[in-house]
Image: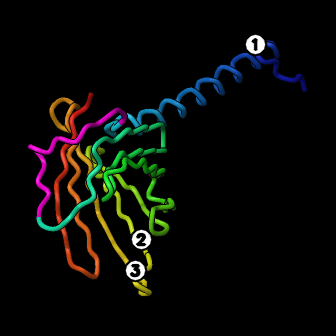
Amino acid sequence: MKQKQSLYPNFLRNSVQLFTIAFLVSFLVNMNSFAQEGKVDFSGEWFFNESKSDMGEGRFQTSLKLTVKQEGNNLTIERLQTGRDGQEMKITQKLTLDGKESKNTARRGTRKSTATWSDNGKTLTIKSTMAFDRGGETMEMKSVDQWKLSGGGKILSIESSSSTPRGERKATMVYDKK
């Protein structure tokens, strides 16, 4: 019995296979990029707008400036704050945007946070817990921050709520992009 010969020589068949593999790899890479495309990008320098903010009751530590870098699945937030003594402090927080827990060293202890996107990719929710010692007692503070952009991406609003043994606090901080 005679063996059936292929219509394509070996080198051509290998070229078709390579093209198919290259196409599939390119398709998968583009699908991953497309999955990230629907999410807003908070990157930039943001300056606190006191007149548009609602600080609620109680004392909130407000960042005068936020420098945000959002790269792929990583978010880095550098906060410029003023301490009680008037001294400026920089605090850096690094998060992943996939809902996995991130740990960051804070002034009084370790802050554990998770960051998750809303279904439409327009709101980022950061939930944090921090345990610290105060007067020989261990206290826990929980907070939830919801980040949203408006004004064509030039206004950042952070709706913040926190719970401590001293009570609940809510505030909305508004930042302008420069």
Query: Residue visible at 37% across and 55% down?
Result: 116
The residue that label 3 is drawn on is: 134
Which mark is in front, 1 or 3?
3
Labels 2, 1: front one: 2
Badge 2 or badge 1: first in the primary sequence: 1
**Secondary element at image label 3:** strand
Quadrant where the C terminus sits is top left
Q: Which residue is mark 1?
A: 12
Asked if the residue at tag 2 contacts the one at tag 3, i.e. Cβ–Cβ closer than 8 Å, the answer is: no
Instruction: Determine the residue positioned at 42% across, 60% down.
Output: 114
**Label 2 sits on residue:** 130
**Label 1 packing within 10 angstroms: few (<14), some (14-19), many (20+):** few
Mark 3–mark 2 distance (CA, rounded to whole Å) = 12 Å
Q: Position of residue 144 (x, y in %)?
A: 29, 63
Is residue 112 placed above or below 146 in the rendered structure?
below
| Residue lying furthest right | 1
Residue 173 at x, y percent in the picture: 19, 50
Q: Quick one: quadrant of the N terminus?
A: top right
User: What is the magenta range?
Assistant: 43-56
Disc 2 crowd rating (10 Å Cα; few below 14, some 14-19, many 20+) is many
Q: Is residue 155 left or right of residue 21?
A: left
**x and y percentages locating residue 52 in the rendered image:** 10, 44
Label 1's element? Answer: helix
Tell me the CA gap for discs 2 and 1: 62 Å
Q: Amino acid at mark 3?
A: Arg
